[in-house]
Structure formats: C-alpha cells, structure tokens
Amino acid sequence: MLKPDIQCRLKKDFGDDFMEVIKEINQWDAETKGLLGDRLLRATIYLSRGRLKRFKEVKEMGRTDYRDVLWQAEYDGGEEHLRDFNRPFGNETN
C-alpha cells in the first residue's frame, strides 16, 4: 500500500501514465520481495519529473545501486544534504 503523499504525487506528476507507473512500482516491489522502501520510491519519483520513460531509467539505476538514486535526489551534487525522502513529499526539504 502506497503512502498517501506518494499516491498524490504520482497522480499529480504522471497523470495519464499513473496506472502504468503503479504497475512498474508493483513489479519492482515484488522483485525486491516487499523491501522497496518509501525513501527510494520518493527519490525515484522526484528524479523522474513526471516522465514514465525516466521513471523506468531511474528504477533501473536503483536496482543497480540504490545509493546513486538517493544521492542524486537528496544531495546537491556534492556533500550538502538538501532533501530527506524519509519524510513525505512536501516536507522533504531540510
């Protein structure tokens, strides 16, 4: 079950592709045996910027090394921590 903030952000960002993204998330979650965390999912959605193709690319990056996704989404390209996706969308900024 997706958290309410994640569902709202998916609907807002992906519009007509909402159900396709839900399918991708469910598949990803099944592949990780239910271990797909909210933090990685929020970071993936953030980096996707509402584009289904980009979501799939970021998802693949997360499969290879989830830390790359978190670093790109939460940091400024260096060491400054700008966002914390452990927090719900709308409250993620430091």
Image (cartoon, rainbow, N blue to C red):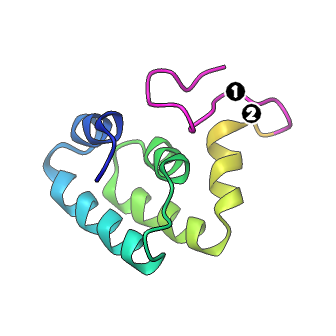
Label whose residue precedes the other's in the sequence (1 or 2): 2
Disc 1/disc 2 C-alpha distance (Å): 6 Å
> What is the x, y in percent for residue 34?
43, 69
**Horizontal placement of 5 versus 77: left or right?**
left
The image quadrant that residue 73 belongs to is top right
Q: Is residue 10 magenta?
A: no
Overall secondary structure of the magenta stretch?
A: loop
Residue wearing tag 1 = 82
Residue wearing tag 2 = 76
> What is the x, y in percent for residue 29?
40, 69
Q: Residue at x 34, y 42 (%)?
A: 3
The image quadrant that residue 56 belongs to is bottom left
Q: Is residue 88 magenta?
A: yes
Q: Residue at x 51, y 60 (%)?
A: 58
Is 66 drawn above or below residue 72 in the view shown? below
Residue with the most extreme right position: 79
Say what secondary structure mark 1 lies in.
loop
Magenta range is: 78-94
> Label 2 is placed on what type of residue?
Asp
Is 88 in front, or is 46?
88
> What is the x, y in percent for residue 24?
31, 67
Is 52 drawn above or below residue 80 in the view shown? below
**Horizontal placement of 78 versus 87: left or right?**
right
Crowd band around label 2 with a 10 angstrom C-alpha radius: few (<14), some (14–19), many (20+): few
Q: Which label is found at residue 10?
A: none
**Horizontal placement of 17 versus 37: left or right?**
left
**Horizontal placement of 9 versus 91: left or right?**
left
